[in-house]
Image (tube, rainbow, N blue to C red):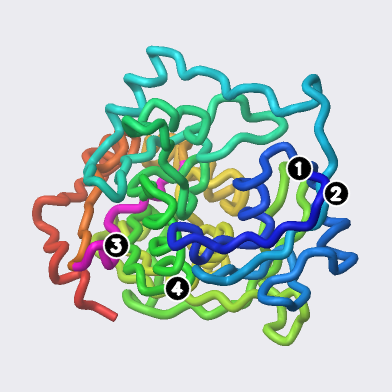
Amino acid sequence: MTQVSTETVKDDEDGLRLDRWFKLRYPALGFGHLQKILRTGQVRVDGKRAKANARLEAGQTVRVPPLPEVPEGDRPAPKRRVSAEDAAFVRSLVLHEDRDLFVLNKPFGLAVQGGSKTVRHLDGMLDALAGPDGERPRLVHRLDRDTSGVLVLARTRQAASQLGKVFRSRSARKIYWAVLHGVPKPAQGKITAALAKVAAADGEKVVPVDPNDEEAMRAVTYYSVIEKAGQKFAWVSLKPVTGRTHQLRAHTALIGHPIVGDPKYGLEEIAKEGRELGGIENKLHLMARRLVIPHPRGGTLDITAPLPEHMRRSFDKLGFDTSAYDMLAEADVD
């Protein structure tokens, strides 16, 4: 593209970050060049300079400067086709489907997105869920690799925009189940501890910091003990008000009761004791059990995921009975 153009943000692009909008409109545009034209003010939104993380609104105009031609050999490679095995696998995860979204039961151990050491991941399988027009579902929130449970995908760009606003506004009601080492006291409580990301030997993690620290991210979690196995283990409900990276894992460890099987935030001696005394598998015992959100077309979407197999075996061993627990009552507890 050798001339300046002015593009209008479409209805189904409402809520997109500016850098993401460029990536969708101009997939061959390199990251470095995009940052340069943003930094030098060549990109304007409604006539004003804008940063990469600016959220666009339908009807706004974007000034697009001349963009370099990309040689044929340097253009992005076509997407890898999903194997028949992976296609069948991802379809087997669907808990709910309508014309706006999918809800999946993400399994333990499967990363949502790829990385330098992650080749097989959910995002790489989503072409198997593409509609007749070839549009693939979009991720609108995330779960850690070893956290299982409810995960929502948008089927259209417009649904992605609306659902993205739901998760950013914290109007989504998220209920997690976990098994903790020990029994928190009191049985119900609120954990308020600001978190900040730091580098760790096994990758990124979060640590509690002074809330006035410039890197601090406000983080709030409500917890409630549902059942306990003596004083060794507790089945708890966790309700994050905020959605920080590793928030539930860091918060439960902070109060001295890390999640069973957590290699990053669990205390080594406690994890060892759990294996010896309870016969509990050394896998993260955390799942996104239930999600209640406004549906893009109105009304409410309320989805519950089943226990992953390793947690089901642990519940059986510890005598935790999910059939005796009233999920509707839980949703009303603040």
User: In the figure, is residue 23 to the left or right of 39?
Assistant: left
> Does label 4 or label 1 sit earlier along the sequence?
1
Identify residue type, mark 3.
Pro
Give the position of the C terminus as an image quadrant: bottom left
Q: Label 2, on which residue? A: 33
SS type, badge 4: strand
Give the distance between the C-alpha atoms of the residues marked 2 and 3, in whole angstroms.
35 Å
Q: Which residue is mark 3?
A: 296
At 85% from the left and 58% from the top, the residue drawn is 37
Mark 4: few, some, or many residues within 10 Å (few <14, many ≥20)?
A: some
Q: Which residue in the protein does label 4 denote?
A: 221
CB-based contact (under 8 Å), mark 2 and mark 4: no
Mark 1 touching mark 2, by CB under 8 A? Answer: yes
- Examine the image and state in which quarter residue 127 appears: top left
Tell me residue 236's x, y (percent): 32, 61
CA gap between label 2 and label 4 equals 40 Å
Q: Is residue 232 visible?
A: no
Query: Residue beneath label 1, please?
Result: 29
Q: Please report whichever mark, 2 or 3, sits nearer to the chain's N-terminal start.
A: 2
What secondary structure characterizes most of the magenta part?
Answer: strand
Q: Secondary structure at mark 3?
A: loop
* Residue furthest out toward the bottom: 212
Please report contact status of discs 4 and 3: CB closer than 8 Å, yes or no: no
Q: Earlier in the sequence, mark 3 or mark 1?
A: 1
Mark 1 surroundings: few (<14), some (14-19) or many (≥20) residues within 10 A: some
Across and down, in percent, residue 321 comes to 15, 50
Left/right placement of residue 314 relative to residue 219 reads: left
